[in-house]
Image: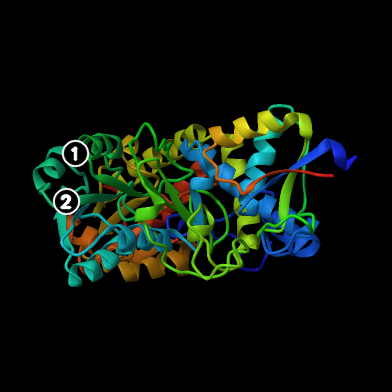
Amino acid sequence: MTPLAGRVLYLDNAATSWPKPPGVAEAMTAFLADVGANPGRSGHRRAVEAARLVFDAREGIAELVGASDPLRVVFGANATEALNLALVGLLRPGDRVLCSSMEHNAVMRPLRALEQRGVGVDVVACSSTGELAVADVEAAMRPRTRVIVLTHASNVTGTILPVAAVGRLARDRGLLFCVDAAQTAGAVPIDVVADGIDLLAFTGHKGLLGPMGTGGLVLGDRVDPATLPPLKRGGTGSRSSEELQPDFLPDKYEAGTPNVVGLAGLAAAVRWVLDRGVADVRRHEIALTRRLLTGLAGIEGVTVHGPGDAERQTATVSFTLAGRDPAEVGLLLEEEHDVLCRVGLHCAPAAHRTLGTFPSGTIRFAPGVFTTAEDVDRAVAAVRSIAGGTR
Amino acid sequence: MSASHSVVLVYTVAHAIRIERLLAARGAACRLIPVPRHLSSDCGVCVRIDRADTPLARRVIAEAGLDIEGIAELR
Ligand SMILES: Cc1ncc(COP(=O)(O)O)c(C=O)c1O
């Protein structure tokens, strides 16, 4: 244990998961110590071994989200890069795009930048608990609407949005459907085919339990790579005689030496998640969420923002304490109780406006797969002591 | 040994690994090897197969929707 580990209670898994499962750090160390070569750049066995590690990660992600072709999993730095690739690549001036009012800035900022270039952006309002009505999405469609982009679950309230229903709608109307699975991949079951998802952006360091600096985009059958330009161009190790970017997958979107250290860790992490089963992770997190919601409901002055129903959200719970600044509460949680969480706006100002918690934000507890019931009780007790009483 | 083998020439190492794993899943022995000097390829590796498995390899590659450079006999 490092000195920082101590008796700290880490409840910031929505920002990044910690700890990582056994095998992740080991896989990364093993790559650096024993492999170390550049995948696809050379034909020797170490380079091939590096390429295999990357491919293991590709296969793991494909299996986890129900994609049949691992070559349609393209890696990048994180969900943010994947969302930029998807949105900047798909949307042209004159097109319109639909999103919800619960999006993270990883969606909103690319969209607002595209808006300045002539893309129409329609934001569908969610309820004050962050929930999205499919009828409202349908009502917001316009003739030029080309893409619907939705967060699968809010990083502020955990609210799960109805992706399968919106996916069906998108399909019926011939629109492309892009889902930001940063908060759900590895924690909530996803099936890109059954859910009608054409582009799934994921990040490796949250519910997938891998290292930071890994993520990517899963492309469905309805996305023709010829119509989706890459964000960056450069060396791929393939087609070296040509100065044009290769048009085949995954190389088209993977210019530059990949983060093989990270992807080796991600492959091990995803294997762990697959072995445990996302459904089982979900059951555990529902139980923790229920306990947390019940505990918080018993404290005078606490308001939970979000569905307040463990089945309708991820393990992320946002709350405020009457008359108290979230930043002050966050500091007390850390200094007096060694509880680490995130307070404020969580990179999602649109979501906080929807909830009515802008600009001071909320206190966010995000347990994870390694959090226990006792941990949740300790967090609730800490809030009770700061709030100074029981309801 | 070589006379009984062919190689699948691919555009990128990810395709080589995809083919290798699809063939292995069907019980066909194959191996990634550096591209023999007399054959051209970009990515440095190719998939060596038993020549007798060439029809199977073509089928697997077609099913996976992969574009390849070609299949060459080793001699
Ligand atoms: C809903 C949502 N989308 C996108 C992101 C961006 O993820 P990353 O920072 O790994 O790119 C996050 C996390 O920060 C998130 O919670």
- For the residues labelled 2 and 1, the Cα–Cα distance comes to 10 Å
Q: Amino acid at mark 1?
A: Arg
The local secondary structure at tag 2 comes to: strand
**A374 over A227 or under it: above or below:** above
Outermost residue to the right: B1
Residue under label 2? A145
Residue A16: x, y in percent?
A: 48, 59
Residue A40: x, y in percent?
A: 66, 59
A177 sits to left or right of A338: left
Regarding residue A298, the answer to whether it shows in the image is: no
* Image disc number at residue B49: none
Front in this rendered view, residue A261 or B27: B27
Chain ID at mark 1: A
Residue A340: x, y in percent?
A: 47, 62
Q: Amino acid at mark 2?
A: Thr
Count of numbered labels shown in the rendering: 2
At horizontal 29% and vertical 55% (from top left) the residue drawn is A319
Residue under label 1? A173
* Ligand 1: quadrant of the figure: bottom left
At horizontal 44% and vertical 48% (from top left) the residue drawn is A218
Chain ID at mark 2: A
